[in-house]
Amino acid sequence: MTGRRPWWKTALGLVFTALMLFPVYWMVNVSLTRTSDLRRDPPSLFPVNPTFEGYAAVMSQQLPSLGTSLLIGFGCVALTLLIAAPAGYAIALLQLRGRGPLNFILLVAQMIPAVVMAMGFYAIYVRLGLLNSVWGLIVANSTIAVPFAVLLFTAFMSGIPRELLQAARIDGAGTWRVFRSVVLPVSRNSILTVSLFAFLWAWSDFIFASTLNRNGNLIPITLGIYKYIGNNTTQWNSIMATAVVASIPAAILLVVAQRYVAAGVTAGAVKD
Amino acid sequence: MSTNSTTVRGAGTPGGASGSMPVAAPPRRLPVRPRVRSTQWAALAFAAPLLAYLVVFYAFPLYRNVELSLHDYTVRAFVQGNAEFVGWEKYGEVFSSATFPKALRNTALFVLVSIAFQYTIGLALAVFFRNNFRLSGVLRAMFLVPWLLPLIVSASTWAWMLNSDNGIVNSALAAFGVGQINWLTSPGMAIWAVTIANIWLGIPFNLVILYSGLQNIPGDVYEAASLDGANAWQQFWRITFPLLRPVSAITLLLGFIYTLKVVDVIWIMTTGGPADASTTLAVWSYREAFGTGQPDFSPAAAVGNILILLALGIGLVYLQIQRRQEES
């Protein structure tokens, strides 16, 4: 058996992965380096004298930003699900008229550059006084996720066996009951995938944060890092420590929900 | 038939709390139409949040954007809302600006070089991971990491790695006798530096899509080929590559659209500089609107609209290719 699965391929795979993940390792390495060692030439490949001063700086300065990012991430997930799940149901199972053009619009919506959306939102938010507010950011961030989410829900819900829905109808369930008690529970996996991506995109967003929330009291972590870079160009260990902390959700999701990540990436691309 | 349908709809939901759902347990003798019609209302009700959302949060910002590009918006006019209508003047200014040819060249370079390398490396890795060796699943998952990290994290890490004096890249190159390269601060290198970082960012996406495309190629095709004596290289060019063409097309299309709108990576690493050396159209638009102390929304919106047209153009080319493939 072992002959069929040669070890050298595993070795090669390990080398490739190590090369690919080197920047991530380097981020961790620099985050543990003492300020006095940052300018050493050549830089040391391992954190020989590790220090946590960078992380101490994160904890004392960036905790509020982390909270804001969490809030925005969860708000974005809720808003996205609230809009996309019923829409997917209508398109996939209720034969909504005009679903062809609607699908096309959703595809086109994903092509619009975030800069363009940011300018449009800025122009609107200036008047409504929504600049520098968490709610404004939640809405703006959700525009990244909603078209994707609707397309993903539609694709998944189209595959739900009709017998299941008919059985529920015969039992006297209305459209809403069918949605709540049959379609939603069956769609659990796609709900997870959508939530995961909506959260991650909102958490990672920089463009909307840096345009719609430039002078806010509550800034998300991405903006926290950006301002940090601007203020302390010498303190790269603290900057990298913040970056490591900002990567934690991605790491958790990769470990817990890797299956859904791969499913989501593929669903965005391989449609019928 | 029509009378029938009215009575049925009038009867509505006996005892049902929600009037919009008379579809529950339809008596069998009913014609199909009323059911379809009432389902349409239900469908519309379920889609209503999305439709409202698209109008308010997509159509309206886009409309505002077009409006911005056709007026002369200064900061004061922006708040007061009394900008002067100038027609296509702002587009003229954009096209005749000295930045435009540079931004166009940088955009072409950034997009084409990025997707060429992302696709090639992604495909090579996908083929490599197709052999189910030990740990292949775990390693493939690890490859997702760059894609999951917030862009600001990756971009600032790359910025520090490419730092002229203290970066690991230069010190590694020095070991091979290469002199100091000013990756981010020399006009000739900046665009290549951000392209390298962007290639790294895009590899996971290409790998995942192409890998799932490979899974759909049945294994017995390869078995037949190897019985006929085809070696691995021939198998790739005669089987894998042709059968993967639809997936490759969508991968390249999405890569193009995503790369066209990249702002964060470039902005964080070089802010489009030095001078305009790494300014793409998207970065230019961002800088005009938000990057300086003096926001200039009208040209920024004009550049943004040009970007949308570019993306749409590529989308249409893709649809055309897809249609031709389906016909043949």
Image: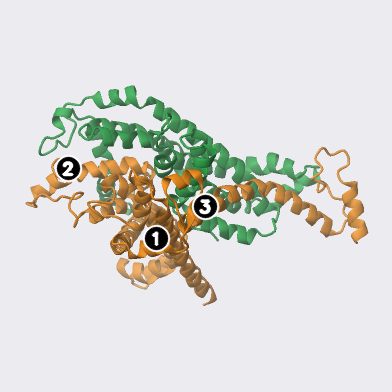
Asked whether the viewer can see residue A88, the reply is: no
In the rendered picture, chain A carries what hue?
A: green
A58 lies left or right of A156: left
Where does the image place residue B31, in percent across and percent down from the top left?
86, 59
The chain letter of the orange chain reads B
Amino acid bearing label 1: Phe
Disc 3: host chain: B
Of circles 2 and 3, which is in front? 3
- Name which of mark 2 and mark 3 comes first in the sequence: 3
Where does the image place residue B294, in percent across and percent down from the top left?
35, 45
Q: What residue occupies the far bottom of the structure in this picture?
A: B328
Q: Tell me the residue at 73%/42% (across/down).
A: A176
Q: CA distance from mark 1 to mark 3?
A: 26 Å
Residue A62, image quadrant: top left
Disc 2: host chain: B
Please name whichever residue, A59 or B64, is drawn nearer the observer in this view of the structure: B64
Q: Which residue is mark 2?
A: B167
Q: CA distance from mark 1 to mark 2?
A: 30 Å
Q: Which residue is mark 1?
A: B256
Q: Which structural element holds mark 3?
A: helix
Amino acid bearing label 2: Gly
Where does the image place residue A6, in percent across and percent down from the top left?
29, 52
Colour setup of the view: by chain
Disc 1: host chain: B
Q: Which structural element holds mark 2?
A: loop
- Name which of mark 1 and mark 3 comes first in the sequence: 3
Of circles 1 and 3, which is in front? 3
Q: Which residue is mark 3?
A: B64
